[in-house]
Amino acid sequence: MTEIVHVHEVRLVGDADWIAVAEICRLCRLDLTAVIELADLGLVSLRGGSSEEWQLPAAALPRLALAGRLIRDLGVNVSGAVLAVELLEAQRELESLVRRLERLTGQ
């Protein structure tokens, strides 16, 4: 009997790390064109010379994953995905601020 063993490589990535754009596309299930458009609209910043060398900060991964889900699952266009991600982040920041103020005022 033959046993099949799958080996997966795991590497922890910190916020200061940079990830190749091809890996970002795979992780977020986005095509390169969408990632470029998201960068052009200011959602993330790219670094590198040619498209094969482009990298994105690991800290941008949650933003890109959310944008990818909005585009893929809800059919939102790229501009709408950027707006939605920015609004959701602003909402989280405001909710966090309200919780902090409530703790300070004892409410």
Image (spheres, rainbow, N blue to C red):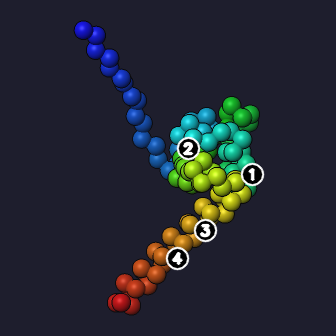
Q: How much space separates mark 1 and mark 4, taking CA atoms? A: 26 Å
**Quarter containing the N terminus:** top left
Q: How much space separates mark 1 and mark 2, taking CA atoms? A: 17 Å
Q: Give the label, 1 or 2, closer to the camera.
A: 2
Q: Identify the amino acid type marked 2.
A: Cys
Image coordinates of residue 22 in percent, x first then y, are: 61, 34
Image coordinates of residue 27 in percent, x first then y, are: 53, 40
Q: Secondary structure at mark 3?
A: helix
Counting the numbered discs, the total is: 4
Q: Secondary structure at mark 1?
A: helix
Q: Give the label, 4 or 3, closer to the camera.
A: 3
Q: How much space separates mark 4 and mark 3, taking CA atoms? A: 10 Å
**Quarter containing the C terminus:** bottom left
Disc 2 target residue: 28
Disc 2 crowd rating (10 Å Cα; few below 14, some 14-19, many 20+) is some
Depicted 96 relative to depicted 22: above or below: below
Q: How much space separates mark 4 and mark 2, taking CA atoms? A: 26 Å
Q: Identify the amino acid type marked 4.
A: Leu
Q: Give the label, 1 or 3, closer to the camera.
A: 3
Disc 1 target residue: 40
**Mark number, residue 87:** 3
Disc 3 crowd rating (10 Å Cα; few below 14, some 14-19, many 20+) is few
Disc 4 target residue: 94
Image coordinates of residue 63 in percent, x first then y, are: 57, 54
Query: Who's the residue at 70% across and 53% down the image?
Result: 78
Sequence-wise first label, 1 or 3: 1
Sequence-wise first label, 1 or 4: 1
Q: Identify the amino acid type marked 1.
A: Asp
Q: How much space separates mark 1 and mark 3, taking CA atoms? A: 18 Å
